[in-house]
Amino acid sequence: QVQLMESGGDVVRPEKSLRLSCETSGFRFNSYVLHWVRQAPGKGLEWVTFISADGTSKQYTDSVKGRFTISRDISKNTVYLQMDSLRSEDTAVYFCVREGTHYDFEYWGQGTLVSVSS
Amino acid sequence: DIQLTQSPSSLSASIGDKVTIACRTSHSVNNYLNWYQQKPGKAPKLLISLASNLQSGVPSRFSGSGWGTEFTLTISSLQPEDIATYSCQQSYSLPWTFGQGTNVE
């Protein structure tokens, strides 16, 4: 079965960096688009970034452009989110998501919490 | 960016009630509108894609409809396990955006 497992969440100070990982299994890794979606405490869902199946195309929401970088390693079936220059407003649970057939968010990981605080 | 507005923001219903949640988009998204269910402390679950396509394993009491800018999620007979927050999401244009969520109590 399809599984996505995030790790790397932590408490960090503003302007610091953090790298999240999402290990996947149960599907052909290089055939699917992968996303990161976040949810601030008590708030709604926010799409952050995606990477295409072949890794050549990436898009970001405006608030993280230039600070966050998504990448994927086919040898490890893992997608990463490098987060630099973190801000308090980046505090959220970060979900790794596999896209479905209709540009939907079909499979979700359990999420990993990132807390940015001085 | 396409804005999504859900109504109501929260609702209280009894078991067996019919529940309807609306989602309005600021620009037409054709039928690229998806619905998710989220329970506290859990990841969201895809219920409906392309406005009306029920995902495999989702009970038939859930249904979706709409086109363009007006969409609806309906639960025909509310069950205890349906107590959750429901969110709509458009996949018509980047950035993908979500509604603010509707809390069903």
Image (cartoon, grey):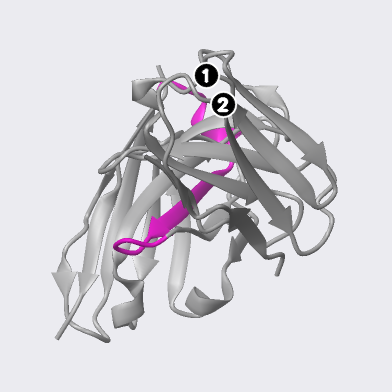
Residue closer to the observer: A57 or B95:
B95
Residue B78 appears at what percent x and percent y? 47, 23
Q: Which residue is mark 2?
A: B18
Q: Chain of mark 1?
A: B
Chain identifier of the residue bearing label 2 in the image: B
Is the residue marked by circle 1 packed among few (<14), some (14-19), or many (20+) residues within 10 Å?
Answer: some
Give the mark, 2 or 1, whose residue is nearer the N terminus: 2
Q: Which residues are magenta?
A: A26-43
Q: Which mark is residue B77?
A: 1
Task: Using residue A48 as the reference point, say whether residue B42 is left or right of it.
Answer: left
Find numbered disc 2 in the image and state the secondary structure of the residue it sits on: loop
Residue A13 location, quadrant: bottom left
Element class at badge 1? loop
The kind of residue on which mark 2 rests is Lys
x and y percentages locating residue A105 in the rendered image? 55, 39
Q: Are marks 2 and 1 in contact (CB under 8 Å)?
A: yes
Q: The residue under label 1 is which amino acid type?
A: Ser
Residue A41 part of the magenta segment: yes
